[in-house]
Amino acid sequence: MTAPVDSQPKPSSNFLRQIVERDLADGTYAQRRFAGSPGDAAHHAAGPLDPAKVRTRFPPEPNGYLHIGHAKSITLNFGLAAEYGGVCHLRFDDTNPEKEEQEYVDSILDAVTWLGYGWESNGTSHLYHASNYFDFMYRAAEALIDAGLAYVDEQTPEQMRANRGDFGHAGTDSPFRSRTPAENLARFREMRAGALPDGAAVLRAKLDMASPNINLRDPALYRIKHAEHHNTGNAWCIYPMYAYAHPIEDALEGITHSICTLEFEDQRPWYDWLLDTLCTLGLLAQPRPHQYEFARLNVTYVITSKRRLRQLVDEQIVDGWDDPRMPTIVGLRRRGYTPEAIRLMCERAGTSKAGGWTDYASLDIALREDLEGKAPRAMAVIDPIKLKLTNFGELFGGDDRLEPCHAPANPHRPELAPRAFHLGRELWIERDDFAEVPAKGFFRLYPGNRVRLKYGFVVECTGCEKDASGAVIAVTATVVPDTRSGTPGADAVKVKGTITWLAVADALPAELRLYDRLFTEAQPDAGGKDFKAALNRASKRVVHGYIEPSLANAQPDEKFQFERHGYFVADRVDHAAARPVLNRIAGLKDSWGK
């Protein structure tokens, strides 16, 4: 399953597409076999030629909620596979039993599906768990030990750190490095059997302690953790390190292009060494995967550190992982951003090694482009004050009469039935649509001025009513006869201002949550800054206003363009017909910092 073609952004050329196209032209993977499921060299050798021209993967660790940065990786990996006749695997990189939970597994499945992608191809599911490969990883580790390429190190963690050296100094060999393969194998099996406590030993590859690439200074392959795993239970008390497991996972699944973010670039020599070695030992199939790195998506005015996002949740700075101000996929979804808008932003951000920042405003731009031709229109009043039409009864046959009005549901979708509402003697208007003493250039309501009630009549302001303290509590006006919108007399009276409104008689009370950016600085945690010092205290404002009666049957997640105010969504958690709750997604134009 992929996103519908007509809703996908048009791909632009980038270095990864060029690599895939080169490999396809050269037939790099044309003779690759795939047995229909992950496996070792013998397993795939028995299978047919792989019908997928390329295989990519999205491999999240289920230790948190996915965020906007992950959306880039999702769209890139699934998008490349769909574009070039391939398959993208969804793999849970669940090699750390202490941080992973089923809650995160479920949220990741939901996020990928919501973004418009799936992991089934030709009736086969390509949903995998790294933990299902633990048996092979252990077998591969024993093979490395037998070949004299791995050893059990029983230094303390502090000793290993000290002996690793740094960029200016070579590392020092471990005193356990000279053990024989037989000795290492026996000790490793004791680790496996649970005979050693946590931290007592690790299995390390035997490479080069003087390598200028510190990642090649005998990297750790296995550590001891007496912890229950969410998938394998208590079957294991030793667990593979991510850098060891990840290349093996790619190879077992027949991945062709292993696409990572730039922080893994200095791990590529290790990735290559491990796979080449295991292929030489006959455990993994050729041609093997290759790793390529791209710059991660950095978006202004958000943070994507899992630790800091958790801090926002734990300290109740936000209202949970799905708070509409959060950059998590669940938060963006609840805010009202669409999958199409997120995919479009990711495509426009580009794919390169150069990095850089994408302005948060680009997501709002993408949303407006997506919803402009889709979202039904409606009127809403956010800061209400009454407008009393003092001659309404005289013109329409009684103060209790309601005059029907109509408006297009969306001017780009003429096939939709028009929306209906009423004009009455008392209306709700925005408080700032009236000024007792207008500023220069103010064309809305003030004594003696005329404005058009959108889809209604021209009215002339006659004044206002005040309470005992002098505060304005209502505005008064008269209807100018024969000026109904859409009639021949509509243009007879020229006005400079048009305002939105709702009849008190049929307007629906609603809770409107006006969200804004969570931080006031473009890079709130750059340079080790305290990100909480940049919190936008006005990032959430809850008001009680009114919405058009056409929204009486609005469903959770349904999106609307409120004329004048921007795009809103019926909250997917709290909205109900008896108690409408709508979130502001974005304004009609970018006004941030203006």
Image (cartoon, rainbow, N blue to C red):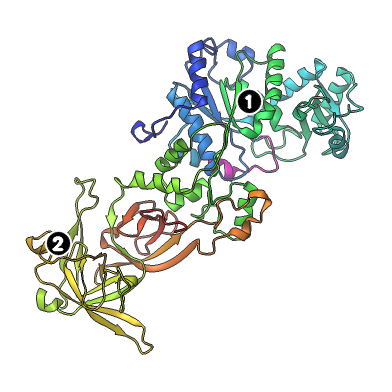
Which residue is under mark 1?
Answer: 249
Q: Is residue 52 above or below residue 112?
A: above
The residue closer to the viewer here, 242 or 594, is 594
Residue 200 as seen in the image, left or right of residue 531: right
Bounds of the magenta segment: 95-108
Residue 264 as seen in the image, left or right of residue 393: right
Which residue is under mark 2?
Answer: 485
- What residue is drawn where x is 52% and y is 43%? 68
| Outermost residue, left side | 488
- What residue is drawn where x is 63% and y is 25%? 249
Residue 82, percent from left and from top:
44, 26
Residue 388 location, quadrant: bottom left
Secondary element under disc 2, as helix, strand or loop, is loop
- Please tell me the numbered disc located at residue 110: none
The residue closer to the viewer here, 436 or 320, is 436
- What residue is drawn where x is 73% and y is 20%? 140
- What residue is drawn where x is 62% and y is 38%? 61
Q: Nearer the viewer, mark 2 or mark 1?
A: 2
Residue 416, percent from left and from top:
21, 48
Secondary element under disc 1, as helix, strand or loop, is helix
Residue 131, percent from left and from top:
65, 31
Indicate which disc, 2 or 1, sits on the residue closer to the N terminus: 1
Residue 368, percent from left and from top:
36, 48
Look at the numbered discs 2 and 1 and tell me whether their residues touch, using CB distance below 8 Å: no
Magenta span contains residue 383: no
Mark 2 is surrounded, within 10 Å at the Cα level, by few (under 14), some (14 to 19) or many (20 or more) other residues, namely some
Assign the N terminus to one quadrant of the image. top left
CA gap between label 2 and label 1 equals 66 Å
Q: Is residue 220 visible?
A: no
Of the residues shown, which amino acid type is indicated by label 1? Answer: Glu
The residue closer to the viewer here, 520 or 51, is 520
